[in-house]
Amino acid sequence: MHGYFGRYLRVDLTHRRIETRETDSIWMQRYLGGAGIGARILYDETDASTDPLGPANMLAAFTGPFTGTRVPSTSRHHVMARSPLTGIFGESNVGGSWSVHFKKCGYDGLVVVGRADAPVYLWINDEHAEIRDAAPIWGLDAYESAAWVKGRTAAKATVAVIGPAGEKLAPIASIPHIGHVVRTAARTGLGAVMGSKNLKAIAAFGTREIPLADPARLEASVKERMEHIKTVTETFRKFGTSGGIGTYEKIGNFPLKNWAQGRWDGVGKITGVAMHDTVLSGRKACLNCPIVCGRHVKIAEGPYGPLDGAGPEYESLGTLGGECLVDDLAAICKANDLCNRYGLDTISTGATIAFTMEAFEKGLLTCSDTDGIDATWGNAAALVALVEKMGRREGIGALMGEGSYRMAKALGRNAVEFVVHVKGLEPSAHDPRRFFSHALNYATAARGACHNASWSHPYELSLTAPEIGIDQPQDAYQIDGKAEFTAKLQNMQTALDCLIICRFTQVGKAVTLSDVTRWLSAVVGRDVGVPELMEVGERVFNLKRLFNTRAGISRKDDFLPPRLLTRNRTGAELTNQLPPFGRLLSDYYELRGWGEDGIPTPAALQRLGL
């Protein structure tokens, strides 16, 4: 057994029972790890009747064969459950250090079921796991809680923890992972799943060696590539994920005013370059990552200081900033910090505030509804105040914490016409009117409007993947071949989520698929080629689709909201186009081997061994 320990922890909180289970060896080949094995267990052990906030729902966290190895940018794991926000497949991929510490305890994954009768946390350390009392920290924020847990376990431990939003079951609650850096499993409300189980935190620290088939070969191959990785990601490292905001706004990809505006003169104040020149105090990296994209900011004084902590990334600046037209970088940093403390998904939080601002503008909400907060576009103080309300679930924050789609349904009237979501999940900060691949991807991704499911926009701008037939960037508005292009990238990114390796290794072709398969072969001790890797990705993508079709998802749900299908984005030099969605989706279903209703056919499932 190489690259794995061949076992995972299963914790039943209702009966306070912890057991070690063997991982099916066939699964390691068919699903590899991470998103694959986790999805298989979630599919097998839950069904359409499982209450996302009930004890039968499971929280699954799985590492991959790359986790904890010398392969760069692989300190990651995949977290899954039935989502309390969408009711379908919920997942989030998170970096930092928790995954490495956990895997070095001697396990590949963790499954938690049941519900404790009082607040608890898990402590996992070198093949030992126990359930401990967390009553003293119930109600504290994520940072306070993590510090308390570390003080009672190990100073070097990493703590996956929920804040008050997760405790109060906000469907947009996240799971911050606090170690030497802060990274968050943010999307689809997985923090509320922890809260529903009375599980405040999961702390891990391990020292076991991970078995590798050919460590010398792996070391030499990675070392050979390392200088190239550092060279091509130098600008990315300097300015972080938000370094390209100015360019994205220029080409029409950056979201503005709840996706309704084309141009914004305030964008220059919130870019990664602006952050670098003002509030940036340092850079933070996940374990064993040469890219170092994380930001650390410091604000000494003013209405949003003092603040000394993790800075906002691209998506957070897009939603808390661009979507709300807030150009006060200090206020966005404060809102981002509050999301970390309360345990809120910054994407859903910012999008819901933007929706609230439009509802306020249209008269569906007034100051009496918003607890006296003047929820007007660009109001930085209102942004921060509304995050506070959402984190505590007080006043208007109780409704906003449900996410924008549920809020729209509660407001009624024409609110559903300007709420922007797919299957209940607010989109990432990339515009499908600028990249037709994302029109398809948002509609068909398992968790909803998620750019990471295909991460295809760089491949419509500049990247190539000749190993899978993408020999040159594809025109963003091309229709013929767009289905195949999008599906290939969805399969590839899904496979990478099984290994697991960060998307940002693809920047500048720092790491290629050929590198990935060469490293995987050295880790597991058998030759793994690109076709096998892509088949795993396709298998897991279809497995997630089966989970969703069992929950009632079909073509009726594979849509884009009216704003992204009917309202063109205009402004100087913009080239955005409305996607011809019906044609694109039909082509995609045919390419996938799915029926007209969007359900995988028996032939497709048989071909994939499902």
Image (spheres, rainbow, N blue to C red):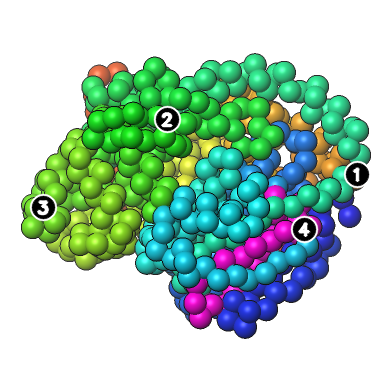
Point out the image quarter for the C terminus.
bottom right
Task: Give the magenta-colored segment's residue range.
Answer: 101-126
Nearer the camera: disc 4 or disc 3: 4
Tell which circle, 1 or 4, labels the residue nearer the N-terminal end: 4
Which residue is labeled 1 in the image?
Answer: 213
Which residue is labeled 4 in the image?
Answer: 126
Point out the image quarter for the N terminus.
bottom right
Q: Nearer the viewer, residue 414 or 249?
A: 249
Residue 237 at x, y percent in the picture:
55, 23
Nearer the camera: disc 3 or disc 1: 3
Q: Amino acid at mark 1?
A: Ala
Verify whether residue 301 appears in magenta.
Answer: no
Tell which circle, 3 or 2, labels the residue nearer the N-terminal end: 2
Nearer the camera: disc 1 or disc 4: 4
Q: Is residue 419 left or right of residue 54?
A: left
The residue under the point 57% across, 66% down is: 121
Which residue is labeled 2 in the image?
Answer: 297
Disc 1 to disc 4, C-alpha distance: 22 Å
The residue under the point 70% across, 30% down is: 512
Q: Nearer the viewer, residue 261 or 52?
A: 52
- The tag on residue 153 is none
Query: SS class of the residue under badge 3?
Result: loop
Query: SS class of the residue under badge 1?
Result: loop
Disc 4 to disc 2, C-alpha distance: 34 Å
Tell which circle, 3 or 1, labels the residue nearer the N-terminal end: 1
Q: Amino acid at mark 4?
A: Asp
Query: SS class of the residue under badge 2?
Result: strand
Residue 516, located in which quarter of the rendered image? Answer: top right
Callouts 1 and 4 close, C-beta under 8 Å = no
